[in-house]
Image (cartoon, rainbow, N blue to C red):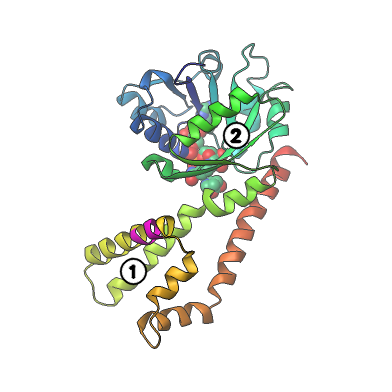
Amino acid sequence: MTDFPRIGFIGAGNMATALVGGLLAKGWPASALMLTDVSEQALSVHAARGLRTGTDNRELVASVDIVVLAVKPQAMKAVTQALADCPQQPLYISIAAGIPAQSLAQWLGGDAAVVRAMPNTPALVQTGATGLFANAAVSHEQRVQAEQVLGAVGIALWVDTETKIDAVTAVSGSGPAYFFYLMEAMIEAGVKLGLARHDARDLALQTALGAAQMAITADVAPDELRRRVTSPKGTTEQAVAVFDAAGFADIVEQAMRACAARGVSLANELTGA
Ligand SMILES: NC(=O)C1=CN([C@@H]2O[C@H](COP(=O)(O)OP(=O)(O)OC[C@H]3O[C@@H](n4cnc5c(N)ncnc54)[C@H](O)[C@@H]3O)[C@@H](O)[C@H]2O)C=CC1
Ligand SMILES: O=C(O)[C@@H]1CCC=N1
């Protein structure tokens, strides 16, 4: 194994772009990264910064150690079946929601080494969070490689059963969208309360950053941090009472259950299970 395994991305969209950006920023050599896509436009941003790009997925498989399958779940069967007779045996890392490792291995010809990963877009700024699951064909060295790649752009942890990848998707894969949604709502409400939009934005985003930073570094759990902001008979108490009356925790749970359930239904739709 070289220090930096060669990684090829099939699909150069949002998530591949976030991972590539994070890897480059972390010092991964550009010469060890390659991308293919059917869209020249998707590739152009990568070509512009000197990365190898192309449209031939089989050629990519032949020139890397790790293939990251980064197309939409709906495209995965056709993309992987077209690779089934490739003589090379790279480690495949699928980042697709839903699609089981067993289906991927079967479409790839039967005994492919497949890691299912569920990363998230903050990988772009080295604060990603990834859940990983390996099929039985993945060697110890390949597990180390998968961890090396995803761990370079944030935290990466293994789950012991594949169904937990749907839970990871609900927490961290889709999770950035929930926080962005809250930011959007806080900015709009701040404007309605009379702040200039740029001030509402700066204050809301800095608060999100500060809260996350505190929650990560504090020696107490988020509920205690929340209590410390919430003075008895004070202002926060009123805000939290409104959240509680609207069933905030229940809404979050329902949203995350719907997210995880979509992982299951995607698998059923796309694998014929
Ligand atoms: N966007 C996100 O936050 C996350 C996405 N994912 C997963 O990552 C995968 C990609 O998602 P996005 O990047 O958001 O989608 P995207 O639509 O931005 O990117 C997919 C890319 O695949 C390309 N593509 C389609 N067919 C192809 C083929 N035959 N060969 C090569 N490239 C092909 C498309 O042109 C497109 O550029 C999905 O499976 C999704 O479930 C996982 C975690 C987070
Ligand atoms: O929304 C999706 O399906 C993808 C998977 C996790 C985040 N984005």
Q: Is residue 128 left or right of residue 71?
A: left
> Which residue sits at x=64%, y=11%?
87
The residue lying toward the viewer, choosing from 169 and 69, is 169
Q: What's drawn in magenta, residue-wise?
A: 210-214
Q: At label 1, which amino acid type do we have?
A: Glu
Q: Which residue is mark 2?
A: 75
Above or below for 268 versus 203: above
> Which residue sits at x=55%, y=30%?
146
Q: Which residue is mark 1?
A: 188
Circle 1 crowding by C-alpha within 10 Å: few under 14, some 14–19, many from 20: some
Determine the image quadrant of residue 44. top left
Asked if residue 68 shows in the view, the reply is no
Residue 242, percent from left and from top: 46, 81
Which secondary structure, mark 2? helix
Q: At label 2, which amino acid type do we have?
A: Ala
Question: Main structural element of the magenta stretch: helix, strand or loop?
Answer: helix
Determine the image quadrant of residue 255. bottom right
Q: Residue furthest top?
A: 87
Label total for image: 2
Q: Is residue 63 left or right of residue 182?
A: right
Residue 130, percent from left and from top: 53, 42
Asked if residue 67 shows in the view, the reply is yes
The reply to whether callout 2 and callout 1 are in contact (CB within 8 Å) is no
> Which residue sits at x=60%, y=55%?
259
Determine the image quadrant of residue 32. top left
Which numbered disc, 2 or 1, marks the residue that appears first in the sequence? 2
Q: Which mark is residue 133?
A: none
